[in-house]
Structure formats: C-alpha cells, structure tokens
Image: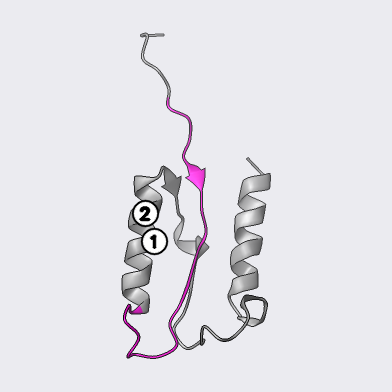
Amino acid sequence: MNGSQISPPPELAALYGRCSTNRQEQSIQAQEANMLQWAKANGFSVDDHAVFLEDDISGTVPLASAPKARPCFTCWSEANTNI
C-alpha cells in the first residue's frame, strides 16, 4: 500500500421533482440541475435511473398519489439497503 487513503463511496440518492405548469418559477430541467448540483456538492451519487421527474403534476396532489413518487422511494430504499 502506498499510504494514500481510500475515500468511502459516495452516498446514493434518488431525485424527485415535479412542475405543474410551464409558468412555474423553476422548470423541471432547472429543478433537476439544482438537485444534481446539490447532490454532488454534498457527496451523493445519482444514477440516471434514479431521477424521477413529473412535469404535469400539481403540488396540490399528495406525494403518495404522484405516479413517479413511489418508484423514486422504492429505488432509493433498495439502493440504500443493498450497500
């Protein structure tokens, strides 16, 4: 061993964003970019298959009823229990 330290693997994250209208202040693309930037800055790794975006779901719809919310939480849960 050459004395260098091995960094621990990054934490895994799943991203979920939604945007109900094209007049919303932050587009779905801006939300994704902000979430990815935050994840990277905070030591998280995000695979492409762990990004769940809904550009037609109102914030008034309960998260449990949003079509992509459950797959997002399932993805995150499975990734973090199989480490």
14, 47: nearer the viewer: 14
Classify 10 Å Cα crowding around label 2: few (below 14), some (14-19), many (20 and above).
Answer: few
Classify 10 Å Cα crowding around label 1: few (below 14), some (14-19), many (20 and above).
Answer: some
Look at label 2 and name its amino acid. Trp
Residue drawn 36% across and 70% down? 31
Q: Using the numbered discs, state the Cα–Cα distance from disc 2 to disc 1 in whole angstroms.
A: 5 Å
In the rendered view, would you say 70 is above or below 55? above
Residue drawn 63% across and 69% down? 71
Residue 55 rendering spot, x and y as whole percentages: 44, 84
Numbered tag placed on residue 38 in the rendering: 2
Can you identify the residue that label 1 sits on?
35
Q: Secondary structure at mark 1?
A: helix
Left or right: where does residue 66 sit relative to residue 53? right
Residue drawn 66% across and 53% down? 78
In the rendered view, would you say 52 is above or below 65? above
In the rendered view, would you say 44 is above or below 29? above
Residue 13 rendering spot, x and y as whole percentages: 51, 53
Q: Are marks 2 and 1 in contact (CB under 8 Å)?
A: yes
Start-end of magenta stretch:
7-27
Look at label 1 and name its amino acid. Met
Left or right: where does residue 65 sit relative to residue 40? right
